[in-house]
Image: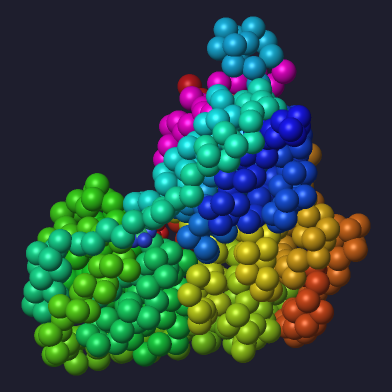
Amino acid sequence: MDERVSVTDGFHLVVDALKLNGIDTIFGVAGIPITDLARLAQAEGMNYVGFRHEQSAGNAAAISGYLTQKPGICLTVSAPGFLNGMVALANATTNCFPMILISGSSDRAIVDLEQGDYEELDQMNAAKPYAKAAFRINKAEDIGIGIARAIHAAVSGRPGGVYLDITAVTLSEVIDAEIGRKSLVKIVDPAPKQIPAPENISRALALLASAKRPLIILGKGAAYAQADKDIRSFIETTGIPFLPMSMAKGLLPDNHPQSAATARSFAIGQADVVMLIGARLNWLLSHGKGPLWSDTTQFVQLDVSPTEIDSNRPIAAPVVGDIKSSIAALLTALKPGQIKAGAEWLAALAEHEKKNIDSMTKRLAADPHPMNFSSALRAVRDALAGRPDIYIVNEGANTLDFARNIIDMYEPRKRLDSGTWGVMGIGMGYAIGAAVVSGKPVVAIEGDSAFGFSGMEIETICRYHLPVVIVILNNGGIYHGDAPDAPPSPTGFIPHARYDKLIEAFGGAAYHVEDTSSLTKALTGALAAGRPAIIDCVIDPKAGTESGHIQNLNPKTSVAAGPART
Ligand code: ADP
Ligand code: MG
């Protein structure tokens, strides 16, 4: 008789449960109590990517979730590591990206009595307000169920960030291997289809058919849904002009004849029926209110979340369902010739587009020395021409505003940016996440300030030999340069800083450019080399406006600084 007892433990069960559900990548930072989990995951054939800071690991996980529709996994240590990862988890939830933050945690008996354990924190309850769901696993036998619950919560309905707490004791708990194997759950249908009600479909089509000036707004929910063909077919069949939100750029190519992007304000202001596809009427769309919007505009809204409807303005025709199913149902029900955008409306849009294109062309033709945002981004655009396969990551205030307009996108889900929060710090995490899950090159277009938030991850990029090229539009400060008198100004950085020198420390390629033709040449060369690089671009420190295009959101004091204010 075989005397050996076959056993397993919590570490093995976590890895087994993830693999069983098709999850093959973990982004994380190792340490107590999850170091062996990271090691084991790698030994068991998972792709483990080790970062320098949990926020970037979390951002990589979040964007991989957006790109793959599978929850991106971020692994952290307890308390401080967990909290660092929380920023990314909250950002994922805000942006509707599926992600699971798994953190190890300290002894519950001590934590709950606040007796001062190593890295003591009630992590599950701390996570709750910022996550779509938060769970804690207290027994090795529950790991299978715990991971199944986390996956369901992350990807079903409106996707979001899920926190999964696993105590140190649970990770090292040894149980019978057979009991462990039986405790695992292979999920049958993690993100079940949500079919819209037929009356939602007929009401939406009737409203669109009645429109004189219809408009479609595509959001990142539409991009996430991977219903690219059907969305394009609906737009082309109906002839309705469309506007992409920034991360939906490329869902249809930016040079598509029906794109109204160059007449955005006019299109929004004049449209009588607007169909929102996976886009919220939040601050990025002025809440659907004046002066940008007319108060007589009627809305069709496609969204998976029923509570999104009527959140900012009444929605005349809600279509609640997942976008893939909703668009398919609309296409099936659409009768030939039922909806056709009118020639007058298209002509009015074309006229406005022409005016805006002319002024943009003029702005882009200028070649000032030092470079400004427009001229530098035109040089970047020239180097990217013919490379629609490249992922673009973009953050910074002015860098974001200008790049969104100047860099056209031609393929879906290739533009990854500051998103719903307008957050800074996603740069290197998103770049690494995109490069790891796609194997494709990434160009991160960064302001010098934005880059600083995640800059240390260039070591990660070099360590994993990722094809990430970082273009830093360096105007020496937040918004713009500001000579550092004593004390340094709140928005100024060291003038003439050489960000390219940083990557030399890790064996990456360094470029420093002061004019547009050198910039195009450097980026073309760096992409051809296919290895990590930083291109430090000298931008006029006077270029860039405070808060970029959202100055209206920045309150300003009108009272002079100083002591005497009586
Ligand atoms: P953007 O910032 O591009 O306008 P938002 O993040 O504001 O986009 O909106 C995305 C919307 O898409 C959210 O309301 C979300 O509920 C919805 N959404 C996300 N995924 C899906 C999906 N698969 N099907 C339907 N709606 C979705
Ligand atoms: Mg700057």
Instruction: Identify the residue shown where x is 19% and y is 92%.
Output: 343
The foreground one among 348 and 458 is 458
Name the quadrant of the N terminus: top right
The foreground one among 191 and 545 is 191
The foreground one among 484 and 532 is 532
For this view, does 560 lie left or right of residue 532? left
For this view, does 244 lie left or right of residue 520? left
Res 369 → quadrant: bottom right
Q: Position of residue 503 (x, y in %)?
A: 85, 60
* Residue 130 colored in magenta in the image: yes
Instruction: Identify the residue shown where x is 52% and y is 63%.
Output: 68
Q: Position of residue 418 (x, y in %)?
A: 53, 57
- The span picked out in magenta is 118-137
Where in the image, quadrant-wise, is ligand 1 located?
bottom left
Q: Does residue 60 appear in this view?
A: no
Q: Position of residue 52 (x, y in %)?
A: 76, 45
Q: Does residue 504 appear in this view?
A: yes
